[in-house]
Structure formats: C-alpha cells, structure tokens
Image: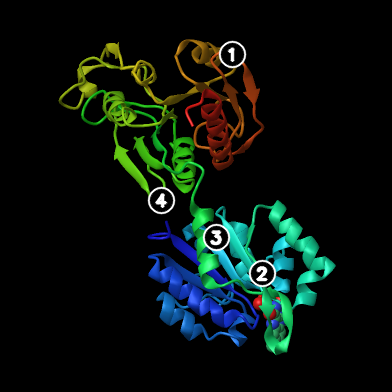
Amino acid sequence: MLAGRRIVLGVTGGIAAYKAAYLARRLVEAGAEVRSILTEAGSEFLGPQTLAAITGNPPIGSYFGEPDVSPHTNLARWADAIVIAPATTATIARLAGGISNDVLVGTVLAAQVPVVVAPAMHTEMWEHPSTRRNITTLEADGYVIVGPDAGALAGGDSGPGRLVEPEVIVAALDAALTGDLDGWSVVVSAGGTREAIDPVRYIGNRSSGKMGNAIATAAARRGATVTLVTSAAPPDERGIDVIPVESAQEMADAVWTAAKKADVAVMAAAVADFRPRDPGTAKLRRADGAPEIELEPTPDILAGVAAMEPRPFLIGFAAEAGSLDGAIAKATSKGVDLLVGNDVSRAGSGFGTDTNEVTVIEPDGTADSWPVMSKHEVADRLWDRIIEMRRQKGSL
Ligand SMILES: Cc1cc2nc3c(=O)[nH]c(=O)nc-3n(C[C@H](O)[C@H](O)[C@H](O)COP(=O)(O)O)c2cc1C
C-alpha cells in the first residue's frame, strides 16, 4: 500500500527525533516517496543532512527562504498522507489550536489527507491536562494518534511517553491510506461534450469538468480504481486512468466499455442531447451564407448504463436552470440509483465554479438539499452516501 505513495514526514524537537531517521528509511524501503519537514527544534536533534540523504530530498525547515515559495501548500497538494514522528507537546498544541505559524502545522492545515501523529514526551507532559485536551481534540478532528508506548524515557525516567517503534508507525500509515473505497472499480464522466459542426467549430456547453474531476479525485484518494472519461482537463492526481474524449458518441463508447467492469458509474459530464447530422468536412464559409444545421439525437449514455445487465450502481447528474423539477423527473424515470441535481443559474453553483449547491434525489423522488460547499466536499459526501446506499442494498 505504501509503494508509490507520497508521504510528508514531520520531525519535531524531541529526543526521539533520531528514530525518525529509521522511520524515513522504512518508508523509502516500502517504496514510498518521502519529503520531510524538520522543525527548528527538530533540527537540534536530527541533522537535516541525514533526512536529505535517506529521503533524497532536503527537509523543509521554514515557510521562508526555501527554493519553493509556498512550501506548505505545495507539500499539502503533493502528499497522500502526513506522518509526524516524533510529535512534541508543542506541535500537538499547535495542531489542536490550528496555529500554523510553522511550516509543519501549515502543511497539515492546508492538506486534505490522512495525518498520523506519533507523540513522544515525558510522562508528566503526556499526562498533563492540556495535552489530554489537545489529544482529544486531534482525535475528534480525525487525526490518527499512534502511541505513545510506556517504557524507558530520556534521562533515566520510565513511563508512558515513549515513541512507538517505526514499524508500528508504518503500519498505522498503511492502515490510514487504505481507503473506504478500496477494491472498488469506478467510472466517472466529466466535462462538456463537443459536437462538430465542421472541422473547426462545434456545439458545446459551459461545463468545466471540475465536479467530475473532484469526484474522480476523491474516489482515487479513498482507494478506488478510477477511470475518468472526460472532454475537459483532467485532475493532477495519480491513480486515475484518463480517457480523453470529445463527442457524446466517443464518451458513450468509452463509458459503456468501462461501465461493464465497474462497480459504480458517476455520470457527471454535461452531454449534448443533439449533434449536427452531417458535420461539414470542410470549414463553412461566411460567403456561402448562414448554414442550416440539422440536428439529430446523441446516444443517451445514462440510459445505456441503466440498461446494462448487470449494471453498476449508477449516479446521474442533472444541470437545471431554475426549478429542479426536471431533475426530479429524471431521478424517477432514468433508472439511476441516485440523481444529483443542481441549479446552474444560482451563484456559487454549477459550471466553472469551485463550489456547488446540489440536491440529491432518490428514484422515489425523495430529495435532500445540501448547502453550498466546495466541489471536493460535495464529492466526498457523495461517496459517503454511495457507500451507505450500497450497504443498504446489500452489495457491500
Ligand atoms: C533535551 C530536550 C529534549 C526534549 N524532548 C522533548 C520531547 O521528547 N517531547 C516534547 O514534547 N518536547 C521536548 N522538548 C521540548 C521541545 O524541544 C520544545 O517544546 C520545542 O519548542 C518543540 O518545538 P517543535 O514542536 O516546533 O519541534 C525537549 C527539549 C530539550 C531541550
């Protein structure tokens, strides 16, 4: 599971920092790509050169003065997971408070990936009420806390507070990266199709592909094998098999092939309903006068998947301008398991935006309106819903 994964290793200022060198080595041996962040105090306990030599990349020590002008956001985007080992009381407190005045906490706050925290400190510090409170906060915020062990501590003391062994941290990281969509095969369509009028011009629509990209990205991050059939620019995310297409026909062919092997199909593309019957083979000329373009229906991709036997769990999207009545009608008639409707005429919803306000409609017409949220949040919530529904149907 760690092979090929991108791990940010945060090392903070405790005696146990020397063990982070072993941890970095274990991660590299497991096939992970490792970049490290060494806090100022951390660098008093472990040499930056050691981390650089083991990981192949010099550790980041600060927001400022690095070759990368925005190390926290770039590392956050790059990472599949973050592990902080050892984690001091000070770093734990900053994480719990969201105090991002160092590049490690800044990276964690900018990231949307699993974070494993391995505390190490003296027993009194571990048992202090403030540390107890902060650990409870981190657990509630979704951090994975591993350890500490009880045993010999620096200075001849003994008790809880000892950093767990690197192998235990690797196992925790491995488990954190095993997503809830592990083993699922998923096909997602995205973007707006382009139907040729002549070799130069097309009939298109305003879809940016952002919603479909967010759905594919979330699925890949949660462990699914993802095929993304898209006419738009795909996301910069590993583990997504991208099939670029242009027309509704190309999208239909690619989706129908992929859907045969898929557990779930999420059809988020805006597909043209009609296309020019006879696209010109040469560019139409103004001098020839306004052309009359006869249209014909395109293949109904959603209906094609719905008719498959057996068929994947099927989610359709309906972009409506104004009322969502059309989306409700589609949910009840199209043979989907779930339909996501959105009113693209609203601010913060629909084409090209980074946010969306959707209504999720079941085949019996039950509608659930979600508030405006980022397309990434919509995507994650949609996958949560799909998991729940597949469980109820007994297909999980
Ligand atoms: C010798 C020595 C050992 C330390 N060991 C620890 C430790 O194991 N755990 C801890 O929480 N703090 C320890 N500290 C205190 C931290 O280094 C200090 O709180 C520092 O500000 C942490 O900064 P950081 O979290 O940004 O790395 C130690 C300090 C010294 C001088």
For disc 3, the neighbor class at 10 Å (few under 14, some 14 to 19, many from 20) is some
The residue singled out by tag 3 in the image is 172
Q: Earlier in the sequence, mark 2 or mark 1?
A: 2
Q: Return the residue nearer the eye: 47 or 111.
A: 47
Residue at image coords 45%, 80%: 52
Name the residue tied to disc 4.
236
Query: Tag 2, which secondary structure?
Result: loop
Q: Are marks 2 and 4 in contact (CB under 8 Å)?
A: no
Horizontal side of residue 138 vs 110, given as left or right: right
Distance between mark 4 and mark 1 Cα atoms: 36 Å
Q: Amino acid at mark 3?
A: Ala
Ligand 1 lies under 8 Å from the Cβ of mark 2: no
x and y, in percent, of residue 266 in the image: 44, 30
Residue toward you, 75 or 161: 161
Q: On the image, numbered disc 2 is attached to which residue?
A: 148
Q: Is residue 191 above or below residue 111?
A: above
Q: Label 4 crowding class (10 Å Cα cut-off): few <14, some 14-19, many 20+?
A: few
Q: Amino acid at mark 2?
A: Pro
